[in-house]
Image (cartoon, rainbow, N blue to C red):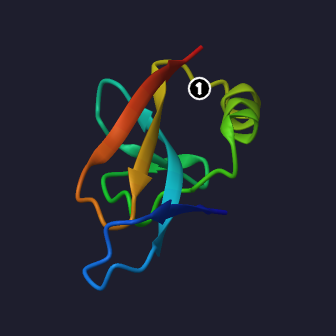
Amino acid sequence: MSAKLLNGNGSNGFTQLQTVKRLLRNTDSQQYFKDGDWTSNPEEADSFSDVVEAAEICAQHGLTGVELAVRLDAQACDVFCTPMR
């Protein structure tokens, strides 16, 4: 699930919506969590509705050494990362 973020930088002066993805990323391999496994492609990775859902997945799968990466669809890189413990 993805959230929407309002972005007022539309070229026509109108506000645009961007999809916000919350991904789990392994801090060593830089791969993203997908269906109990890992992928190097963030587009294939599981996206979480909020930090609570991401933390629950970490607990269910015994994940350590991961961080929550926040990515905007229009961006080619993660815009924010924070460790998950």
Residue drawn at the location 64% of the way across and 50% of the way down:
48
Q: Which residue is identified by label 1?
A: 63
Position of residue 73 relative to residue 58, above or below, is: below
Circle 1 Cα neighbour tier, 10 Å, few/some/many (<14 / 14–19 / ≥20): some
Quarter where residue 79 is shown:
top left
> Residue 52 placed where, x, y %?
75, 34
Q: Is residue 60 left or right of residue 73?
A: right
Label 1 sits on a secondary structure element that is loop
Give the farthest residue toward the bottom.
12
Q: Is residue 19 left or right of residue 60?
A: left
Position of residue 24 relative to residue 39, above or below, is: above
Residue drawn at the location 51% of the way across and 63% of the way down:
6
Picture quarter with the C terminus: top right
Q: Which amino acid does label 1 sit on?
A: Leu
Q: In this view, does 7 lie to the left or right of 76?
A: right
Residue drawn at the location 42% of the way across and 37% of the way down:
25
Residue in the foreground of this view, choosing between 25 and 63 = 25
> Residue 39 placed where, x, y %?
38, 53
